[in-house]
Amino acid sequence: MATIRLIPSTSAVSNSSYASISNASNMYSNTDSTTYGTFTHNRASTSNTYYGYLRGFNFSVVPDNAIVSNFTVKIKASATGHTTSTSSSYYMSLVNNTTQIGSTSANGRLNTTVTVFTFAEGSLTWDTIKGYGSNFGIRIPMRRSSRNTADVVSVYGAEIEVEYTVPTPRTITTTLSGNGTISPSGSNTYYDGDEINLIITPTNTSDTVTATRDGADITSQLVAHGAEIDANRVLGAFTLESGSFNSGESWFEDREGKGHDTSDTTTSNYYSVSSSSTAVFTYDVGFNLPSNANITRVYAIINAHAESSSNANEYMCFQLVSGSTDLSEEINFKTISTSNTNHTLECDTLPTVSQIAVMKLRCRLGYYGGALNGATVYVEYDIGGTLDHYTYTFTVSADTTIAVVIGGSGDTDKLYVKINGTWVEVTTAYKKINGAWVEQSNIASLFNTTDNYKKG
Amino acid sequence: MAVNKVIYANTTLIDTSTDTAVASDIANGKTAHSKEGTKITGTLAFITYYTGTSTPSASTGCDGDIYLKVAN
């Protein structure tokens, strides 16, 4: 985590005939400053408000790929001859050029005491203020409390304190030996957390791929995927299982025969049970897959609706099961829709090849019923070692801390410094940038062989 | 004309003719004399590194300096 303080570089007044600026350069500091510049209300009037502006914050010192976790806008100021009104109109505020941004305002009124004020950014985001660029700034109101006494606002400095981290860049180099193709190829820069998909199309089984990260071989970390296969099927054999079914009052109307899929919503299986009955029935939806299939996804799309009624006991539930094992959640179309709608049943825990072989779509029915228009069950899998199309997916991640050792012994992947004859591990490293100490995440770049160093 | 050797009564009082230091060997801003006897100003710049057990104070060091924080 690095912290940097951006400072303003420009100042202006809303009316140069009645307001003025002195020692502006003193304002272009952070709030540690002990020297000041002034905005002055020059008009003998207590009825007019004029504004000073501090803008031109140096956003460019924050790296473009920085991830900003927090920012705070501050200003150090005091005022003499300033209005004593507590109206919010006389609070300092954040602006885009001359327009106040939302309701952002300082956490106090200007007064004779030199104070560091902060601004409640509220919903204001870093990307928004950075987008304002040199127009982003602070508006300082000037209004006299007494007609013949100038309102003089002394500004010692202002800042945007920014906390951020910078992803570590990595150079990933990939090569394919043989006549196939690989994409991306060559050397490319990625950042920690990036996911890289290598698409490799070999021409024969002897083609091999290698990959390095910052020169270190990571080929063994690549995850090979064989050819991806999608299989799907429609509903199979129907079995009524529950013993509570009241055949005198309940019925299943299979109008077009079982097995139609979700592409045909013009025909339906209708079910209805009496108020005293429940029913459980299943459809076979198993797949016979190769024993070495690598299952990647199993799900069903069901098009159905429950009959509309006010009876709280009514339900029409679907679930993918295998034997006594529930493969998916159970969904109740009574709570989903009383008109035909598609709904996806997902197996969050991937079933095995043997479980898929005897998979069923189970329906539980209570009271009234509904209509099942169709269902299609899908299985996605790949076969390792299939020579067709390989996909390697891996995530660039931080490696062990890169070694920089200032003389002496110690682990080669940590930074040590010798103090009073003893090697001590460095926990945090800083570099001074624009007057502020900024924590460094990439210790490897802290020292080099061309600069000279001396102990301070 | 620069002087790099002073001999008085057959005694060599000063002789810089075999000195090897040049401006890049001498700390930035410091002065010395070359083997030719001319005054030179050093250009050797250093990055100062500090060590400590707490977060560095804003008043410590200059831009480009390094601070290494170690455990107590």
Image (tube, coloured by chain):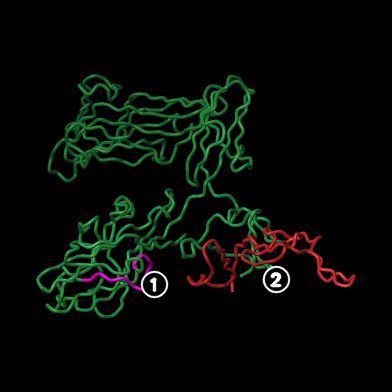
Chain colours: A green, B red
**Kind of residue at disc 1:** Ser
Give x and y (percent) for residue A101. 22, 57
Can residue A408 be seen here? The reply is no
Give x and y (percent) for residue A158. 34, 66
Residue in the foreground of this view, choosing between A277 and A255? A255
Q: Which mark is residue A422?
A: 2
**Kind of residue at disc 2:** Thr
Q: Which mark is residue A33?
A: 1
Give x and y (percent) for residue A298. 40, 33
Q: Residues within 10 Å of mark 2 (few under 14, many from 20)?
A: few
Rendered residue at 21%/35% (across/down): A246
Q: Is residue B44 above or below residue A91?
A: above
Residue in the foreground of this view, choosing between A47 and A343? A47
Task: Give the mark toward the camera: 2 or 1.
Answer: 1
Q: Which residues are magenta?
A: A27-40
The secondary element bearing badge 2 is classed as: strand
Q: Quadrant of residue A79?
A: bottom left
Residue in the foreground of this view, choosing between A325 and A439? A439
Question: How far is the residue under mark 2 from the one under mark 1?
Answer: 39 Å
The answer to which of marks 2 and 1 sits earlier in the sequence is 1
Rendered residue at 25%/21% (across/down): A264
Give x and y (percent) for residue A114. 31, 78
Q: Chain of mark 2?
A: A
Q: Is residue A441 above or below residue A283?
A: below
Q: Quadrant of residue B5?
A: bottom right
Rendered residue at 18%/62% (across/down): A15
Q: Quadrant of residue A170?
A: top right
- Residue positioned most to the left: A47
Magenta-drawn stretch, dominant element (helix, strand or loop): loop
Residue in the foreground of this view, choosing between A63 and B42? B42
Question: With B28 as the anchor, is A435 left or right in this view?
Answer: left
